[in-house]
Amino acid sequence: MTIVNDILKQMPGLGLPQRKFLATLSVTILVLRGRVNFRNLSRYCDYSERTIARQFREPFDWPDFHQRVLMTALDPRSELVSAHDASFIPKSGQQTFGLGHFFNSCTSRAERGLEISTLAVVDVTRRCAFTLAVAQTPPGEAATTAEPAETRVDFYKQQLREHRHRIPPGVTYHCVDGYYAKKKYLDEVVSLDLHAITKLRSDADCLFLYTGPHPKRRGARRKYDGKVNFRALSRFEDLGTRAEEPHLHLYTAVVWHKTLQRRLRIVVLLNRKDQAKPRFIVLGSTDPELNSHKLIDLYASRFQIEFLFRDSKQFTGLLDCQARAESALDFHFNASLATLNLVRAEHLCMRQGQE
């Protein structure tokens, strides 16, 4: 891959030995068979197992590297959104940094292991995602009573704030799943000049906004017009069905969310595929002016970040790290997702050259 050499040459303060190692590492991860650990890497390159382990503990500005790869692959004509999600990493042992209980979506329960929190940029037009920043989620089990314990949501919003300047300036919407639909996280998104798009609870506590005339009486103007019932949609604007999915019926409204303390554009997707048991999900955005069909399409694009986790676990060894130190674990997770970024960037650059 020529792209990795070009990017590494552009990075300031990077020594020649580390530059050569990083260029070799990305190629070796792609060609080796089996687990991506120190011993197996040494079988497929000229570095010894000890040298590889030492290099994994060396500091490297991975967010800057991810950003440079992203800018190389972006098409100015593409529509972009940012996304944020976490992935469970199974890990055994007692001395590994960051071991704790995290939710594993594969088993739908919390299990002991590690978790990585990933901030990504999604190319909606070309339907692909690129990693922008990766950090290991602290377990949160060693919090002392002397200091106020920070929740994982605090860690996620701090990560977003730290890397907001790396998100391309054309990005307006930030897509997250239902776990991130917390007031302090969405407040942070809005304060960073982004609009959040997320999934809401099916029993979200919302109120209709009053739009009628102001009565001739003393006092403040009436604000609300009753509680929202997602099982009685007569007061919602009926958008009909989607052409490609005729079993989905859409309803929309601008409401006040009592828990999030803000106005939201919400869209209810009523699934009538099983007429006996219709189901629904509720999507929401902090942008009340957002088109409802656009909201659905942008939220659906969020799923591209899941392919980052899937492909890195299957092809670039995200789950195979044998290290226990914090620096080595961080290096491994970033190297795995960076290699996937490089492959996608190379592929997209080749397609652009053929067009």
Image: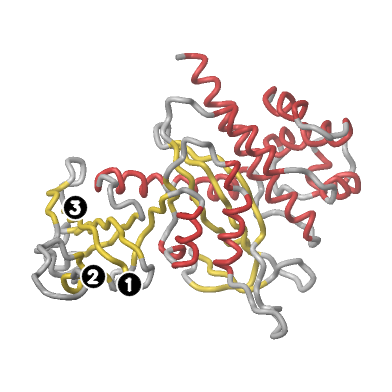
The residue under label 1 is 258
Q: Residues within 10 Å of mark 2 (few under 14, many from 20)?
A: some
Q: x%, y% of residue 172? A: 43, 43
The tag earlier along the polypeptide, 3 or 2, is 2
Name the amino acid type tagged 1: Lys
Name the amino acid type tagged 3: Leu
Colour scheme used in the picture?
secondary structure
Q: Quick one: SS at disc 2?
A: strand
The residue drawn where x is 61% and y is 64% is 155
The tag earlier along the polypeptide, 2 or 1, is 2
Camera-nearest label, 1 or 3: 1
Q: Quick one: SS at disc 3?
A: strand
Q: x%, y% of residue 104? A: 53, 66
Q: Tell me the quadrant of the picture where the C terminus can be found.
A: top left
Task: Tell whether 276 sits left or right of 321.
Answer: left
Cα distance in 3D space between marks 3 and 2: 24 Å
Closer to the camera in the image, 288 or 322: 288
The residue drawn where x is 66% and y is 55% is 135
The residue drawn where x is 43% and y is 49% is 303
Q: Answer whether labels 2 and 1 touch (C-beta < 8 Å).
A: yes
Work out which residue is located at the far bottom of the displayed protein and give it.
Answer: 145
Q: Answer whether labels 1 and 3 touch (C-beta < 8 Å).
A: no
Work out which residue is located at the far front of the displayed protein and give it.
Answer: 218
Q: x%, y% of residue 82? A: 48, 45
Name the amino acid type tagged 2: Leu
Q: Is residue 251 above or below residue 245?
A: below
Q: For residue 131, what is the image quadrant?
A: top right
The residue under label 2 is 207
Q: Is residue 346 above or below residue 50?
A: above
The residue under label 3 is 248
Task: Tell whether 314 sits left or right of 323.
Answer: left
